[in-house]
Amino acid sequence: MMAVDREELQQIAQLVEVNRERMQAIEQQVRQLESIRVEQMQAIEALLAIPDEGSQGAMIPLGSGVQIVADIPSDGGAVVDIGSRVQAERTRGEAAEILTKRSEELITIIERMKTEFDELEQSTVDLAQKFNESVEGLEPEAIAEEPAPSTPAPRRARRKRGTDLTLDD
């Protein structure tokens, strides 16, 4: 019966570890998705900040702190990735709408992942509690799988002949 309990405890411990790893992966994915969403919101703000009559001398960021000065015509659109690395030119309003829809989809995905995280967290807490209760229920002898090896007494350093200290030293 003790072997079954040990096996069950090992399974519970493994499930707890798998759940924790999955929770860490979900947290990382949520952070990445939130970062993408922030980037999308900034792009929407930039698109909507361009006046309908266009803009002269607009500074367009290229990345790494580099910007290029360009004139944006009143009918100037935006090139948007429409999927599968296919890009198409759209009006600024259409581009903002596309990004808004993507942002809403991201919010839905993030919420679903947070719900999954919460469920995993609750499951992990329940498993950990079950593990602790099972460990408390075992007899003390059953917990100690094998006795700790006795540590040998420290050896005294041996002196070579003629190096012993005497009262004369």
Image (cartoon, helix red, strand yellow):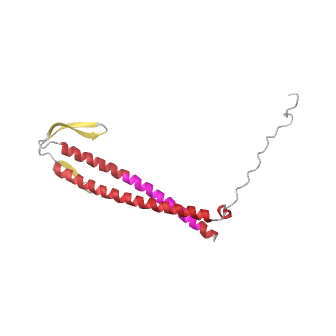
Relative to 163, does residue 120 appear above or below in the rendering? Answer: below
**What residue is at 38 percent from the left and 57 percent from the top?**
114
The N terminus lies in which quarter of the figure? bottom right
Asked if residue 88 shows in the view, the reply is no
- Magenta run includes residue 11: yes
Which of 90 and 19 lies nearest the eye of the viewer? 19
Which of 9 and 134 lies nearest the eye of the viewer? 134
**What residue is at 25 percent from the left and 40 percent from the top?**
61
Q: Quadrant of residue 133?
A: bottom right
Number of numbered labels in the structure image: 0
Which of 83 and 8 lies nearest the eye of the viewer? 8
Judged left or right of residue 32, residue 77 is left
**What residue is at 25 percent from the left and 37 percent from the top?**
67
Relative to 62, does residue 138 appear above or below in the rendering? Answer: below
Q: Quadrant of residue 56?
A: top left
Q: Where residue 156 sits: x, y (%)? A: 79, 42
* Residue lying furthest top: 168
Q: Which residues are magenta?
A: 7-30
Judged left or right of residue 66, residue 3 is right
Q: Where residue 19 sits: x, y (%)? A: 47, 60
Q: Where residue 47 sits: x, y (%)? A: 20, 45
Relative to 165, does residue 81 appear above or below in the rendering? Answer: below
Q: Where residue 147 sits: x, y (%)? A: 70, 59
